[in-house]
């Protein structure tokens, strides 16, 4: 029986304490003079179209001048659910971060607030972020006053349309028409066009036989064009070999023969990758002009091989690296 009475006494005491704390929290304190406290608000960029789950970031820059100090315990608490016109608004404070900067005659508090929408209606309706109330205390005194920060009005929208809607009647003349922005698509198209142009230019540089770009009018590029115009006979083959000899002499700056390949490559290292082809060319030249009875296996007709050889040498003089089989 005594234990029961004791528990009942504890329950009554806790109830009275909660009631007292609640009453103390509901007490309306006098407002502080605006010359001591000022605020600058940074609100969300839009004030309509919020749905369930959306978050609203708000920043309040509070300046408190001496002789007052901010009571940090009076800042809003995470998890507090706002009420609008006496009803739960469905908007909850989910995060708060405070940065303090003390100066000689004032303190500046940057308060970052984050709210989240948890409840909406079946139609678009107004909502509000209530003006948070903070308290300040005069230094060396028990005098406590309050300061109400500005509120922020916005509108929430349902995730889907409820019932029949006449779009013409619902459109507001003050709302600009919705536009589809294709900035990202245009940027991707421009990048793709740039890559395509660069690829085509590189392909033209590698395969082109004209002199439109730098290093495209080299000796072997000209030799390649001349060989294409020669007849498909023994005399045409001899002229083609002479044309390639002339290109080698022009590139080297002196006459180049079969025993001078190493010297040529030392002075023109860009052609080193084509050494097997150069040696094969001199073998073909000896076979055509001096030793017609010695067979030479090229894997294709001599003139066609000469054209391929000129392409390889043309790539070397353009700074490219052709694929040459040893």
Image (cartoon, helix red, strand yellow):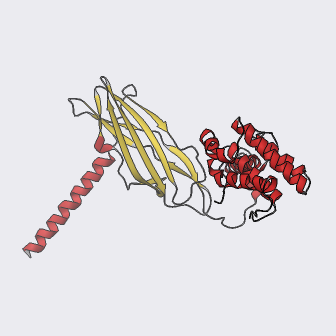
Is the residue 128 above or below the residue 52 in the image? above
Front-most of 312 and 157? 312
Whole-percent x and y of residue 138? 26, 30
Is the residue 176 above or below the residue 89 in the image? above
Whole-percent x and y of residue 66? 30, 25
Which residue is found at the position 46% from the left and 46% from the top? Answer: 130
Tag count: 0
Front-most of 7 and 195? 195
Whole-percent x and y of residue 250? 75, 37
Is the residue 283 above or below the residue 32 in the image? below
Q: Tell me: 208 left or right of 321.
A: right
Residue, far left:
2
Which residue is found at the position 20% from the left and 29% from the top? Answer: 140
Which residue is found at the position 35% from the left and 38% from the top? Answer: 99
Is residue 186 visible from the viewing direction of this image?
no
Q: Tell me: 316 left or right of 223.
A: left
Is residue 45 visible from the viewing direction of this image?
yes
Q: Tell me: 54 left or right of 255.
A: left
Residue, far bottom:
1
Whole-percent x and y of residue 221? 78, 44
For the C terminus, the quadrant is: bottom right
For the N terminus, the quadrant is: bottom left
Which residue is found at the position 42% from the left and 46% from the top? Answer: 113
Front-most of 227 and 20? 227
Q: Tell me: 142 left or right of 1.
A: right
Is the residue 206 above or below the residue 249 in the image? below
């Amino acid at each position: 029986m005594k234990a029961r009475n004791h528990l009942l006494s504890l329950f009554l005491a806790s109830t009275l304490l909660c009631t007292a704390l609640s009453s103390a929290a509901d007490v309306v304190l006098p407002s502080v003079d605006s010359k001591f406290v000022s605020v600058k608000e940074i609100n969300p960029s839009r004030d309509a179209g919020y749905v369930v789950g959306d978050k609203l970031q708000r920043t309040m820059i509070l300046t408190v001048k001496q002789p007052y100090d901010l009571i940090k315990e009076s800042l809003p608490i995470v998890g507090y659910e706002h009420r609008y016109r006496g009803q739960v608004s469905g908007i909850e404070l989910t995060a708060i971060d405070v940065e303090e900067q003390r100066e000689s005659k004032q303190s500046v508090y940057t308060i970052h607030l984050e709210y989240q929408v948890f409840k909406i209606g079946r139609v678009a309706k107004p909502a509000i972020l209530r003006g948070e109330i903070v308290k300040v205390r005069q230094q060396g005194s028990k005098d406590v006053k309050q300061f109400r920060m500005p509120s922020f009005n916005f509108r929430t929208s349902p995730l889907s349309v409820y019932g029949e809607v006449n779009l013409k009647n619902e459109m507001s003349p003050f709302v600009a028409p919705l536009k589809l922005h294709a900035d990202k698509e245009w940027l991707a198209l421009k990048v793709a066009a740039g890559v395509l142009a660069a690829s085509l230019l590189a392909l033209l540089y590698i395969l082109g036989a004209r002199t439109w770009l730098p290093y495209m009018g080299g000796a072997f590029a000209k030799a390649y064009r001349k060989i294409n115009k020669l007849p498909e006979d023994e005399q045409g083959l001899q002229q083609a070999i002479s044309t390639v000899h002339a290109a080698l002499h022009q590139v080297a700056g002196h006459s180049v023969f079969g025993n001078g390949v190493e010297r040529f490559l030392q002075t023109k290292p860009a052609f080193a990758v084509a050494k097997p082809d150069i040696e094969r060319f001199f073998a073909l030249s000896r076979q055509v002009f001096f030793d017609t009875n010695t067979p030479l296996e090229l894997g294709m007709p001599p003139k066609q091989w000469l054209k391929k050889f000129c392409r390889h040498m043309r790539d070397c003089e353009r700074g490219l690296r052709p694929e040459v089989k040893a």
